[in-house]
Image (cartoon, helix red, strand yellow):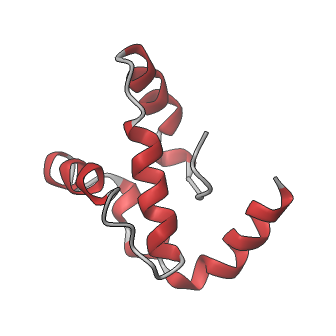
Amino acid sequence: MMSGSFYWSDERLGDVVSICRQQGSWAFRFLMGYRASLIFGNPDDSLRPTWDQLLNECPNWPGFRPERSSQTLAATLDNANKCH
């Protein structure tokens, strides 16, 4: 569901997923995919427009905290993705 990235409970992604799916949108996957690409130090510019749109419209969303897209999470995320 989250395109191989982490998410935190205060980001309310369950609500976001529900709203997106009701609209026939997969935007949440692009958002989380872009975060994963940042964590791995290889930003995927094809996913960036969704990230930028949310950043513009909801700049205080907790998901934009720098520590949540930090490359220091790369090894942990890689290990988590291998378990799935």
**Residue 64 placement: quadrant:** bottom left
Q: Is 48 on the left or on the right of 5, as rendered? A: left
Looking at this view, name the residue that lies furthest to the top.
Answer: 22
Give me the residue at 56% from left, 46% from top. Answer: 9
Furthest residue in direction left, as rendered = 56
17 up-or-down from 34: above or below: above
Residue nearest the viewer, comparing 30 with 7: 30
Q: Is residue 13 visible?
A: yes
Number of disc labels: 0
Q: Residue furthest right?
A: 83
Residue at the (45%, 78%) spot, across then down: 42
Q: Is residue 57 above or below residue 42?
A: above
Rendered location of residue 69, percent (x, y): 46, 71
Q: Name the spot of residue 67 as percent of width and height, x first.
A: 46, 75
- Residue 70 in the image: x percent, y percent? 48, 79
Q: Residue at x 39, y 73 (%)?
A: 43
Give the camera-side residue of 17 and 63: 17
Specify whether 35 is left or right of 54: right
Q: Who's the residue at 39% across and 22% down the image?
A: 19
| Quarter location, residue 73 | bottom right
In what quadrant of the picture does the N terminus appear?
Answer: top right
Question: Residue 14 in the image: x percent, y percent?
Answer: 53, 32
26 up-or-down from 23: above or below: below
Query: Observer-nearest residue: 10 or 33?
Result: 33
Q: Is residue 69 visible?
A: no
